[in-house]
Amino acid sequence: MSVAATEAAVEPQGPSAPVELTDVSRWYGNVVAVNEVSFRLEPGVTGLLGPNGAGKSTLLHLMAGLLAPSAGSVRISGRPAFGDPHVYRVIGLVPEREAVYPFLTGREFVEANAKLQGLPDPAAAARRAIAEVDLTDAQDRPLGGYSKGMRQRAKVAAAFVHDPPILLLDEPFNGMDPRQRLHTMAFLRRLAEEGRTILFSSHILEEVERVADRVLVVIAGRLAASGDFRAIRRLMTDRPHTFTLRSSNDRRLAAELL
């Protein structure tokens, strides 16, 4: 799928975008995880869509400064993402992996992240972040007793506790029940309306459709399409489809179709 005409929607003109990747590649030995990817992100919600193994997590880790690009450049607010501690002040990362300590309570986990960010009142910041993800009633329970959806929300609170202008979320809705999913989606939309830059990955088209204004489609480590979600969705919908029907009663099926 090629949607070159829509690329301007995520590549605006300007000297410095909150997130900018230029010809970025990352390989592990002979395995190429990301291959010559370029895009810019402005404030708002962007969905990173692709099947499992497409390179979404690698891209997020590159933007978070956890990985160095094998080629190309990754810049956060005009600064190199890798090797610059300043990057950790302006981004919040929600990893896909269960990066929580089961013996800590939800409050202790979020407060520890607030302390790592050097906030003047970590306890107050943790309370605010926990309330935003609707975990106040469970904040004093150990994380080991949380459901997967609750742990996901605890990770979102920890990523958001220092009020970063950029949020990177890797499959954030995994394990959430419908109510939790809708609450978190509304929370991300509100943060975007306040001017933050939010990128979240998913392999589920409906999740991206509900939250994102723009989309990056990644397949086999390459950027296959980018731009306004609705324009890309229309292009996908307009593609011809072929359906095969099988029936044990062909005459009755033909009559029903007629």
Image: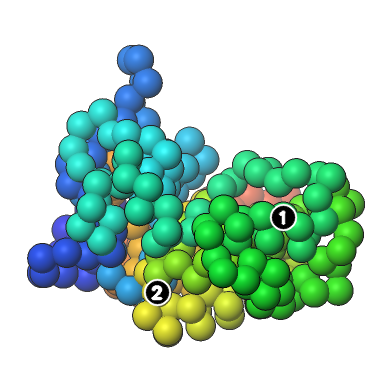
Side (left or right) of 63 relative to 136: left
Query: In what element is the residue under mark 1?
Result: helix
Mark 2: amino acid: Arg
Query: 130 or 45: nearer the eye?
Result: 130
- Can residue 155 be seen from the camera position used here? no
Query: In what element is the residue under mark 2?
Result: loop
Tag 1 and tag 2, C-beta contact below 8 Å: no
For this orientation, the residue located farthest to the front is 120
User: What percent of the width, then of the height, locates residue 21?
Assistant: 23, 49
Side (left or right) of 251 relative to 76: right
Query: 151 or 77: nearer the eye?
Result: 77
Q: Which mark is residue 190?
A: none
3D distance between C-alphas at marks 1 and 2: 24 Å
- Can residue 41 be seen from the camera position used here? yes
Mark 1: amino acid: Phe
Q: Name the colour scheme.
A: rainbow
Tell me which residue sits at (55%, 66%) in the image.
119
Name which quarter of the figure residue 33 lies in: top left
Is 247 rendered above or below residue 62? Answer: below
Residue under label 2, please give it.
196
Count of marks, rendered view: 2
User: What percent of the width, then of the height, locates residue 5?
Assistant: 15, 64
Tell me which residue sits at (68%, 60%) in the image.
110
Is 138 rendered above or below residue 70? Answer: below
Q: Which mark is residue 109?
A: 1
Tell me which residue sits at (53%, 74%) in the image.
188
For this orientation, the residue located farthest to the top is 29
